[in-house]
Image: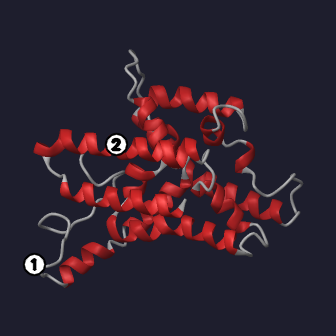
Amino acid sequence: MLAITAALLITATFLSRRIRGRRNRKKAKISRTIVLVLSLALLGFALQGCYCPLGLFQFMLIPGMLAGVLGWIGMTILLFPVVHAMLFGRVYCGWACPMGALQELLGRLPVKGKPSIPRRADALLLKLRYVLAILFTAAVVLAGRGIVDARWGALFCSVDPFHTVFSLFIAGSLLSAVILVILSVFFGRFFCRYLCFYGVILGLACRVGLWTRLCRLVRSREMSCAGSSGEQSCEVGSAED
């Protein structure tokens, strides 16, 4: 899992920085689509969405879950994209995340009459991720310590739509999976944009801009900086779509 994520991120980082500009727009889209398909196949359907960042986040908050090798592997998988975002931007969201890949590829389906979300509703929904992050974190912590009556602390797993889709609708919540598929077809990355607070964490990490700062500090021809300016993007994916 960690090796696959690292390989996809390394490939995506290289491609997103090599293929830039309007002239390479088509080539960048093809390259990103290939990486998205690989992520969907390997991290999604092959592993059935196990060790997803949202699932790992909740396990990190449950007492005793970090004990042992598997706990530390999970922590590494959770933090690796965050550290990468601090250096190179939100490449994980735009290129390597299997959940984002599923939504984007479904959103590319040629469906007529796709609705658009009004600006006011969009601005309101964007704040929803922060509210969900606070409520979700509090619920997991309280459930993991037995303060809130729940079967177990991993609350997201009981409603995880991605695990259901990646397991070919054999396990998980069928209702949430169907809702996810419908929203993705008509609105693309709906979950990513309005519900995924892990994306918020990566967005904040991206603002650190370590690679950009390093390029400005050490202006050497031997360094392979991003383009001529060394700037990194905090948008979803570094290459232009």
Q: Earlier in the sequence, mark 1 or mark 2?
A: 2
Judged from this view, the residue extending furthest toward the bottom is 218
Q: Which disc is residue 221 wearing?
A: 1
- SS class of the residue under badge 1? loop
Pick the quarter of the image with the N terminus.
bottom right
- SS class of the residue under badge 2? helix
Q: Which residue shows up at 42% across the image and 30% down it?
A: 107
Report the Cα–Cα distance between label 1 and label 2: 31 Å
Badge 1: few (under 14), some or many (20 or more) residues near its Cα, within 10 Å? Answer: few
Position above or below: 107 against 68 = above
Pick the quarter of the image with the C terminus.
top left
Residue 35 x/y as whole percent: 37, 47
Which of the colour schemes (rainbow, by chain, secondary structure, one colour) is used?
A: secondary structure
Position above or below: 103 against 61 = above
Residue 90 x/y as whole percent: 38, 58
In the rendered structure, the answer to whether residue 219 lies left or right of residue 162 reads left
Q: Which residue is mark 2?
A: 34
Residue 216 x/y as whole percent: 19, 79
Badge 2: few (under 14), some or many (20 or more) residues near its Cα, within 10 Å? Answer: some
**Which label lies toward us, 1 or 2?**
2
- Res. 8 image quadrant: bottom left
Comparing 84 with 30, the one in front is 30
Q: Which residue shows up at 71% across the image and 73% down it?
A: 66
Q: Which residue shows up at 49% across the image and 63% down it?
A: 3
Judged from this view, the residue extending furthest toward the top is 112
